[in-house]
Image (cartoon, grey):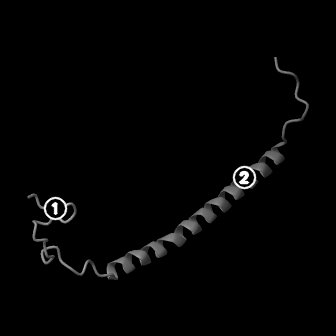
Amino acid sequence: MPPPRTEAPLTPDQIKKATEELANEREHLSTATQSSSQANPPTAKKAVADARKKPLATTPTAARTRAPNGGQTAGSDTKP
């Protein structure tokens, strides 16, 4: 058997007050989380819009000139 309690259990009024305080804190934290998560999407949308405005590579792949030795440039010493 555990030893007898040194403190009296909470009264129904104390339980109600503690429950209300926890519910208020949860709502406060939930509201803070939602407001901070809603602040990010406009920034992300703007970044996507800006990325779409930037032009892609100016030189198409087909128009690039190839090296005379078949495209290999590094270590392309000719054999005697």
Q: Residue at x 88, y 28 (%)?
A: 5
Q: Quadrant of the C terminus?
A: bottom left
How far across and how far down the image is residue 75, in percent? 21, 60
C-alpha span from label 1 to label 2: 76 Å
Q: Secondary structure at mark 1?
A: loop
As drawn, 80 above or below 56: above
Viewer-side residue, 75 vs 45: 75
Q: Amino acid at mark 1?
A: Asp
Element assignment for label 2: helix
Q: Which residue is mark 1?
A: 77
The image quadrant of residue 58 is bottom left
Quadrant in the rendering for residue 51: bottom left
Residue 37 % position (x, y): 54, 66
Which of these two is toward me, 59 or 65?
65
Using the image, determine if residue 26 lies above or below residue 60: above
Q: Residues within 10 Å of mark 2 (few under 14, many from 20)?
A: few
Identify the residue shown where x is 91% and y is 31%: 6
Q: Which of the two residues, 65 or 40, is positioned nearer the viewer here?
A: 65
Q: Residue furthest front?
A: 80
Residue 22, disc: 2
